[in-house]
Structures are given as structure tokens and as C-alpha cells.
Image (cartoon, helix red, strand yellow):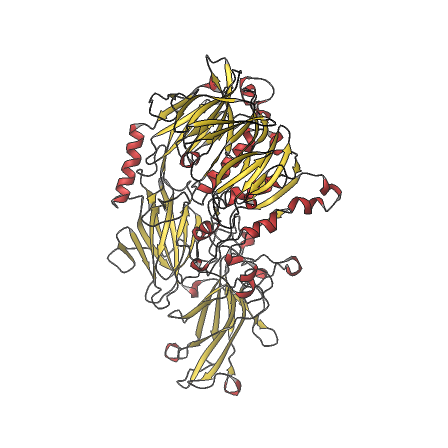
Amino acid sequence: YDKYVVFCPTSSPQSAILGDKSDARGWDEWLPSVVETSMDGMEVKVRGFGGCAATAPLFIAELQGGWFNHYTLSTSYDNVYDYYGEDYTRLLLDTCLAQGVTMLNYYMVYGGTNHGTLGDPDVYTSYDYSACVREFGFVSGRARKLRLGFAFARSFGAPLVGRSERVNGAVEVVPGKMAMGSRRCVGALLHFYRNFAANKAAEYVARVSGVELKGRLGYKRSFVGLGEYVSGTSGLRLVFGTLPVYVRTHVLVGRGEEQAEVWVVQNDAFAGGELAFDGRVKVGKSGGSLAPSVEVSEGEQLVSVVKFGGEVGWCSLQLAGEAGQLLILALKEKDLYTLVPTFEESFWFGADGDVAEAVASCDPLSLIWGAYGVQHDVVAKKLDLEWQHNQQAAFALFSASAVAFGVYGFAPVADPSNPYHGFPGLLTRQCSTALANSLASIHIRHAQETLVAATLDGWSLRDTHFEELPWTQLSVTGFDKTVPSKDTFDLGYTSGHVLYKLTVGAKVFQPSKDVNLKLSLNARHRTLVSLNGKLIVGGHTTYSLELGRAGSKQGPDPFRDTRDYVLPFEYLHRDGQDNVVYVIVESWGMKRQPNIFNDVRCPLGILNVGLVSTPTGGDRTGIFTRRIEFGLHVSGVDVRTLHEPFNLSGFPDEHTENGWTQASDKKPVVARDGPVAQLRLGSDHLPRWFKATLRVSADVASGGLRTPLRLRLSGRATAHVWVGGIYVARYYGNGDCSQYSFNVPETLAHGEQPVKVLVYDGREGADWVGLEVVGWEISKENLSGNLVEGGELFSTFTESL
């Protein structure tokens, strides 16, 4: 089954009825009660269906991983990311595990792009979705915390996340809003912690069989606590713990003939706690500021409570009288963000061979932190480290079963002041000086505004001449003679724009100063009206987040949204020529509708059109109006003839090779404002095509250097952009969409690429767009990946070892 839990304010049931909440400053924070109501009873409810549902594995095929953003809103995906917060996706994972869910799929984990007209009216070009991995490839803090959740499940093995049974009353937690219950599985009793405390305090107390442990957990955070688990190398039996354990591995100790189990934990201001073991436990070697201590309770059963006075470092725990060790390695949250475990499945390697033996355990082949990203290929014996600016060193633990495959130039930690110094098997590697200098140079030049990521040059242009387009004649039908005889589906014009021509014959209507000509239009979704190819009369957008409204993004759309446009007398032909009205209609896609209303013929293009004459300055209705007959024609592109139906504008002249003229900075056509190319319409405001060459600088894309790029658009006109033949941007300067930065696919962000731009509008002040190519500048304050103009340039360099 699917599970969407907390609705974004712009898509909540209330907004669908009462209107949108497009100003993020007015959003209230999401309520824990929504998660509790939606998720905490899932297991009981599903099992209650009976039949196979009573015993089958619980599978959430589509678990919420972010949210949509919509046309006409002033909010962005960054606002949506901030609304849910960094811990939301991990919290849903832990809540699902607490309900016995053993299979789940997030929608989405990686935000993407609706290239061209691929999207439906629910979303625009960007499909970032505020997902864990942002549209331009940045691994956000939300993804990093989710990775820790998966690392716990994967490293402790399938029994811990396989079939389990709920155990009531296994642990008492105060306050009660800190716990989600317990589950018994093969080899452990898991306790699920989630901070929904009313006072938002981080401190709590957990009790099991008279043993009391203190813990810390930030508000709206969660983790899975380990209990009744026996460490195989030390014989230590953990009763339960409030200290978050994120990953388990084994390393070689002593002379390399013995193994010790390793737990990577967190014990800082954000999350931390204590561990309770059966028997008498002693602390062996330690390092850093972790400051472990043991308190022994000799009541009905002998229990040792291990406490930690610091945040970072390590220690060895042993059962009194035993030689085996359990190693505790505590990392700060900033280091846990970069912790990358590399797992392999033995299934892919067969039953034989060294690699198959190495991956047979649940251990990660390597645990590496300190760099932005890691790719470890044990078969090819290759390890890639991806570095960001100011990252200086990486640390690695190669599992006992995989260390024989090589350590890739990592060396033991030699600095005695390092908090990890002395930890068995721990290795480190410095970022190379040359690489660090290269990244530093990019960031310095970016800060000084001297870094040029890419240039756009060699501009040429041509105008769309309406009269030269291929036109198909239509008639008008319906009781009021306003409905075109064929809709866009009949013609195959279902992607992008559709153009209409209304011709008023000179013999049908003679312009007069005392009479206005009024055009009435009902169309979907975005309309621009011009008269005689010279004057932009106006335009409008019909789109709604609310159900049952004209232009509703979802559901039935039965109501008209008729807009009237007066065609000024002074611009009408009075010399015996016909008057021609051109209407550009852009469709935002075929909407998704509830099944009962599902009709592929959802409204697109012009739905109703009429012309009447009215007295100037007088009543425009009733007996004073006169219907004006007109000829109706339509022009577009039949997508049924195309291999790529979503990669076109719908303008029939899109691929015309004739009529291009070279632009010049000396003409008011392609003016320069620094790196910004200002693409201007002509005096007649006809739609205008531009093309140029994008040249990506080797300073941002060479060798292992990776700098994702974006198109940054400005101005009040409308622009559609293709890079390398891919429709990458639909920009609306009038505010119909909040997006102004468009991701350039990384396959196109190098070398030279052709660029094509369609610009139109021409309403007052809307006669140009600005276009430049820049890097993604992100927040320095957190790992959201949110766009911050003037922020830190996202750039990485991959070092192959």
C-alpha cells in the first residue's frame, strides 16, 4: 500500500477546498499527531483485513519522500524541504519499522526534472520534490540521516529487519511521547525511539527490569535502539541502550588473527545516551574525549551501565574475565553526515571466490567518513573519494573480511592528538594538496565573482511569422457557437503550445470609433492574445489548486473561466483588410483525475471563443451587442508523428532553418549586462527564437572536477530553453511559476552545446528575458542543498585510488 503522511500546506485537503497557502511564512509546523494518527496503527489495521493480509509481509510501495510544488505558487521546493525538516524521511523509516514493515520504497529519493512537457499540471519543470538527493545531485542532510538508518538495518543483518513480533511493555519511557514500542526479532529486541514530546525537550529516561538509562534525542528525531543482543566477539550481552548505534562491523585486532566487533555510535547534543550490559563490564583502552565509565548494579541481576562523558572518541569494552572486545566508536553528527558504508550482496558473486567470502557477512566492506562521497568497487579494487572544499582528510575502517583486498593508500592515524588515534584498524588519508588547491581556487574566484562557469555566444535570431505557419480550418459548434469543432486531442496537439487564428472579414465588420470589438476566451492553461501581429492585447492563466474550480490541477474541470479582451479601434484595420487575432495557448499537460472522472479528453487549448461588437464606453451586454462571425484556424505539431513527443514547444516553426540573422550587441536584440544575455523581442512583439553556443569552462568541468550548472533566467517575459537538444526550461516572468533556476543535465555540462530559446509575451514591460549559466550556490548553514544566491558554490573533485 502507499503512504503519504504529512501533506504540504499547498496540497492539504483544506487548501483543496479553501484555497492555497502559497506564502511559506504563514505555514505552521507539521504536527506530530498527524504522523501518530496516520502511521502508529498501520500494523493492527492491515492485519485486521484478514486473509493473506494477516500474515503477509508489510510492503509500502510508495512512502512519502518529499512533496510536489505547483504552478502559480510563490513557494519553492526549498520551502518544502524546510517545512518537513532534515529528520522527516528517517523518522518515517523508523516509524515503519516499528510497525513491522519489512519492505518499502520511497517516492522520491532522488529529485529529478520534468524535461520539456513531460509533467502534468501538478508540477512544473523541476521535479526536485524536496527529496533526499536534490535535483542537481546534492546529497542532502535528509539523505545522510536516512543512510544511517539503512546502515543499521543492513549491518546487523536480515534477522533484525525481517519478521518480528510486537512486544508490549518491554521498555518504559518517560515522557511517553519518546517511544513507539518494541519488537522481538531473531537475535535482538528492538526498541523504537521517536521524540514527539509536547515540550520538545530532548532528555528522557528509559527503564527495563528496574534498570534506568538516560538519553537525549532532538525533537522530531528517531532511532532504533538495540536490546537483548549478544556481541559475538566479546560475549557481552546488551540488555538495552539509549545510545544510538548506527552501524556494525568487525576489524582485525592484536596480530591480525582475531576480530573485534565495532559499533559506530552518536553521543553529542543532538542524540546520545547509555548502554546496559549483563554481568560485570570493564573499560579497556580508550581515546578522545569519550570518557567512558561503568556503574555496576548488583540487584536481582548484575548489570553494568556504561556512560560516556564526551562526544567523540573510542573505547574498548570487555566482559570481566574475558579477552574478547566490543569497540565503541563515537562520531560527531557532522562526521556521521559523511559516513558511507559500502555493502555488497553475496548473491552477485556466487558461492566461490574471495569476494564471495568477503561479502558473506553483513559487514560493510568499508566504512569511510570525512569526504563528500565514496564509491568502493571491491571487484575492480578501485575506490573513489569525492571531495568538497575544506574537506581535508578521510578516515576508513576496512572490515576484517575485506582488508586483504587493499587499503588504497590509507595509513594508520599517526597524530596522537587525534581522537581516533589508537583505534584498531582505523586508517586515514589526506586530500591531495593539488586537489585541495584546485577546489580552493574555484571557491576563491567564485567569491570574488571572477569565476566564469560558462559562456553563451554566437547569437542569432529569427521571428515567428504567424501568416507563414500551416493552418487548419475549424468551425465553431455548440448551442452558443463558441466551441471549436476539433479539440487538441483530435489533432494530436497535446504537447506544449497550440496557436489559433481568428479572422474577421472586412465585409463582416467595419471598425468604428463608436464600436468596440470584444473577444471572449475560455482556454487551458496559459493564453496570450495579439491583434494583427502588432499589438499584445493581453493574456491570462486558468489554473487552480482547488477542486471543482476552472483549471483545477486535478479532478473534473467543468466550469468556464471566460476572459474578455477589447480589441482597440485604433489598431484595427480600416482599409478593407481583414482583422486577424492570434491566440497562443500553452497546455501544462493532461491532468490526473479521480478514476470516476478519468477522461483523456481533459480540457486543453481553446474551449470556448466568441467575438461581439459593443458600443464604446457603453453597456457591453444585452441588446447592444452583436455577434461577429469569424474564421477559425489552428496550428500546432501532431505529436503522433514524433519519436519524442515531449521535447517540443508545439510551435510549427521550431525546427525551421531559414530566416536566421546574426545578432549583435550593438543592436537592442541581444544586449549584455555582464554575463547575462538579454534576449529582447522586436517592436512588433512577435515570438522570437534565439540560438547560441554554450561553452562550459574547463575550470569547472575537467578531469574529476564536478560543478553542476543551472540556467538562471530573469525578466518579465516567457522563455523556453533547449540545451543540447533537450528541453530544459519553461520560465514565466509574470509569476505563473516560482522557478527561475533550471538544472543543466550533467551529461551536457561540459564542452560545447547548442542552445535554443523561444521568447514571447510583449505585454507592458515583458519584452525581454535575461539568461546566464552559473553554478548551484547553496546554503552554508546546513546540508539542505537549498539555493542561496551568493552562497557556497557546490563543486566536488573525485580522486580515484
Residue 309 seen in this snapshot: yes
Residue 477 at x, y = what percent?
A: 59, 73
Residue 22 at x, y = what percent?
A: 46, 60
Instruction: Please say if 673 is above or below 155.
Output: below
769 vs 606, nearest the viewer? 769
Residue 216 at x, y = what percent?
A: 48, 39
Q: Is residue 619 left or right of residue 490?
A: left
Residue 141 at x, y = what percent?
A: 44, 41
Q: Is residue 316 left or right of residue 169?
A: left
For the C terminus, the quadrant is: top left
* Residue sitting at the far right: 51
Instruction: Please say if 527 is above or below 142.
Output: below
648 vs 800, nearest the viewer? 800
Instruction: Please say if 291 is above or below 41.
Output: above
Residue 5 seen in this snapshot: no
Q: Residue at x 58, y 75 (%)?
A: 481
Which quadrant holds residue 800? top left
98 vs 430, nearest the viewer? 98
523 vs 550, nearest the viewer? 550
